Image (cartoon, rainbow, N blue to C red):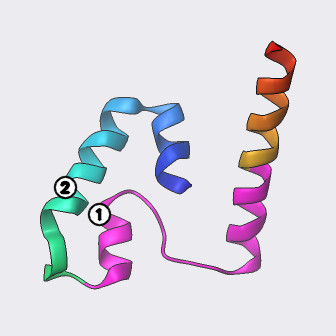
Amino acid sequence: MQIWDNYLHDQETAIRQYRFALSLGATRTVPELYEAAGARFAFDTGMLEYVVQLISRTVEELEAQV
């Protein structure tokens, strides 16, 4: 979800970071791969709130288009 949010703000950078993280394969830890992709490996309250807000905002925007 963080990578998608990054993409919404800067497509080129988000894709570049994502591809870089993929190129690392199994040579790094999962948190390091997330970081390389421009995200943070976290499942805490703050991160879950961020994701819920992102999804809620997107649903509202899509519903407004209908």
Q: Tell me the number on the disc at residue 36.
A: 1
Q: As shown in the figure, which amino acid type bears the numbered disc 1?
A: Ala
Q: Name the residue rendered at 39%, 31% in the picture.
A: 11
Q: Tell me the number on the disc at residue 20.
A: 2
N-terminal of the pair, mark 2 or mark 1, is: 2
Res. 59 image quadrant:
top right
Q: Is residue 25 above or below residue 17?
A: below
61 part of magenta stretch: no
Q: Name the residue rendered at 78%, 57% in the picture.
A: 52
Res. 20 image quadrant:
bottom left
Q: Position of residue 19 (x, y in %)?
A: 22, 50
Q: Which residues fall within the magenta stretch?
A: 29-53
Q: Is residue 15 left or right of residue 1?
A: left
Q: Position of residue 63 (x, y in %)?
A: 85, 24
Q: As shown in the figure, which amino acid type bears the numbered disc 2?
A: Phe
Q: Is residue 31 above or below residue 22?
A: below
Q: Is residue 39 above or below residue 45?
A: above
Q: Residue furthest bottom?
A: 29
CB contact under 8 Å: marks 2 and 1: yes
Q: Residues within 10 Å of mark 2 (few under 14, many from 20)?
A: some
Q: Residue furthest front?
A: 66
Q: Position of residue 49 (x, y in %)?
A: 78, 64
Q: Is residue 1 left or right of residue 46?
A: left
Which quarter of the rendering shows the C terminus? Answer: top right
Q: Is residue 38 above or below residue 66?
A: below
Q: Name the residue rendered at 16%, 72% in the picture.
A: 25
Q: Nearer the viewer, residue 22 or 49?
A: 22
Tell me which secondary structure the magenta stretch mostly adopts. Answer: helix
Res. 64 image quadrant:
top right
